[in-house]
Image (tube, rainbow, N blue to C red):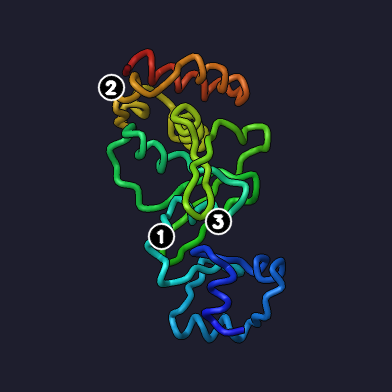
Amino acid sequence: MKYQEFKKAINKPYFTSLDILLQKLNVYNYQLSLWQKKNYIGRLKRGVYFFTDEKENLVALEISFLLCQPSYLSMETMLSHYGLIPEMVYAQTAITTKATRKFSNDFGNFIYHHIQPKLFFGYVPMETSSGKYLVAEPEKALLDYFYFNLGKLNDQKDIDGLRMNCDELRRVMDRKKIDIYLKEYNIEKLTNSINLLFDKIC
């Protein structure tokens, strides 16, 4: 199968090895390697590719979901998005029920933290022209961040050091929802740390 025929058959900015199998396309590994050398396609990870002339139609947030499913963007990525932390984010951080892992490709760095299936909740879908990805609600992004950093949060000084934007916290957070979610985690230190953030800082 010629490249242009293949690209037309896929009809989206990215594809996987499974797409090729499901559509019964006559494309072989040596062709994929050749198209990579010619810069027709780029590789996101093993078995996942994108068309280089459609790179601008993809965003790193969507790529995150393509690399690992199930997953939803959370922690620093979404805290920054919601204006809750001042730091620039240099990697897309997500939560998954699969093993902890990292990827790097043309779209940046991607980090996935493993979480128990019972704690895989609190996200909403975002639709794109070619698919979708999942993002944590503000409340879940905050709880995930505290959950994976509990070892560093031992007192008020540690909470202060997070430099959370209190005005935005008050604006975007639903404290009742946080309390409901905290019951699912059922970790006393996590609850105490969240209480310190809201009761003594904000």
- Is 20 on the left-hand or right-hand side of 175? right
Q: Residue at x 29, y 27 (%)?
A: 165
Q: Is residue 34 above or below residue 157?
A: below
Position in image of residue 12 (x %, y %) = 52, 63
The reply to whether residue 6 is visible in this rendering is: yes
Mark 3 or 1, which is nearer the eye? 1
Mark 2: which amino acid?
Asp
Q: Which of marks 2 and 1 precedes in the sequence?
A: 1
The answer to whether the residue labelled 3 contacts the one labelled 1, judged by CB atoms less than 8 Å apart, is no
Determine whether the residue tagged by mark 1 lies in a helix, strand or loop: helix
Location of mark 3 (residue): 66
Location of mark 1 (residue): 57
Q: Which of marks 2 and 3 precedes in the sequence?
A: 3
How far apart marks 3 and 1 lie (CA) works out to 14 Å
Position in image of residue 200 (x %, y %) = 34, 14
Position in image of residue 104 (x %, y %) = 46, 63
Q: Residue at x 29, y 42 (%)?
A: 87
